[in-house]
Amino acid sequence: MHSPTLQELPYGMDDENVALEYRRHKDLREEDIQSLKEWYAKQVHLPPISEMHLIVFLHSCYWSIERAKSTLERFFTYRKAWPEFFAGTDPRRPKMLSDMEVVLYAFLPKRTPENYRVFYIKLLDHDLSRYVLKDQLKIMDMVLVVDILRSGTSDGLVIVCDFEDATVGHVLKTHVTEVKKFLTYLQEALPVRLKGLYYTNLGPIADLFKGLIKPLINKKLLECLHFTDSFEGVLKFVPQECFPKEFGGTAPSIYDLHVEMQDLLLSNVQFFIETEKMVTDESRRDRRPSYMDRDLGIGAVGSFKQLEFD
């Protein structure tokens, strides 16, 4: 396999973390990881990765080796094809520091009764001029990926998006192409078991936002998609104690969570610098017809024809 050893990667994913994953999952078999390693070693267009990457992707695909292969391909291909979300991720940049002040993205400490992790998103700065969707989706992915690859597998993930004080202006600044691309990445490439997507406090933008989002959600996730008029509606799905103390929960305050988010990004600069390089090298891709050509829309000369959404 053309990957460096775990010790050479700046992710904090050492042998102990890998061993922990084998202890946690009776369905995680060394022979399956070895099979993935042998396949991956032949994919010269893909970047070097660690064993923890393989474990996380295999777990997210419910131990299906073939699905894991496809998801790995999509993950690195999308990250190459769509630099607006996945490039320029050094959190020390002034623009990034400013963008980090606009929205909270946080994994909440307490899990649901099903042992699912809760990812909470909340608009903090209501100045519409500071809100740029592609820049916010970049930060969202940074928080997700650094946590997933450092914390390892989880039984499931639920995402709660709190749109309190969002306006029609926020929706009008939303480009359908950007939403479609990122939702494609979220549904098809991110190595998580996505169990729920909850939008709450939509207020006057509810109908407009639903009309934008629902056509872009695949059938499987559509079953887990919920819109609630108030935060109380979310509590039907996620227990109150999971949330920040402003909502009667046991999690830190929204302010403290936001400080933690900023600290997380700024303390993992090297991780983001290295991760940004981990994309496909299209000049080395095997151009023979394959299922990936069809699924990813990779043309005969390496263009991402179907990836550029209209």
Image (cartoon, grey):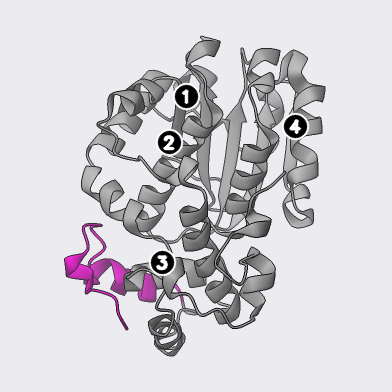
How far apart are labels 2 and 1 at the CA level?
A: 9 Å
Badge 3: residue crowd in 10 Å (few <14, some 14–19, many ≥20): some
Q: Which residue is mark 2?
A: 139
Q: Position of residue 47 (x, y in %)?
A: 36, 68
Q: Position of residue 97 (x, y in %)?
A: 31, 25
Badge 3 marks a residue whose secondary structure is loop
The range drawn in magenta is: 1-25
User: Which comes before the other along the chain, label 4 or label 2?
Assistant: 2
The residue closer to the viewer here, 276 or 284, is 284
- Tell me the quarter of the image containing the C terminus: top right
Q: Residue at x 67, y 31 (%)?
A: 199
Tag 4–tag 3 contact (CB < 8 Å)? no
Mark 4 or 1: in front is 1
Mark linked to residue 103: 1
Mark linked to residue 281: 3
Task: Identify whether 56 is placed above or below 30.
Answer: above
Give the amino acid type for the residue marked by disc 4 in the picture: Phe
**Left of 55 or right of it: where is 288?**
right
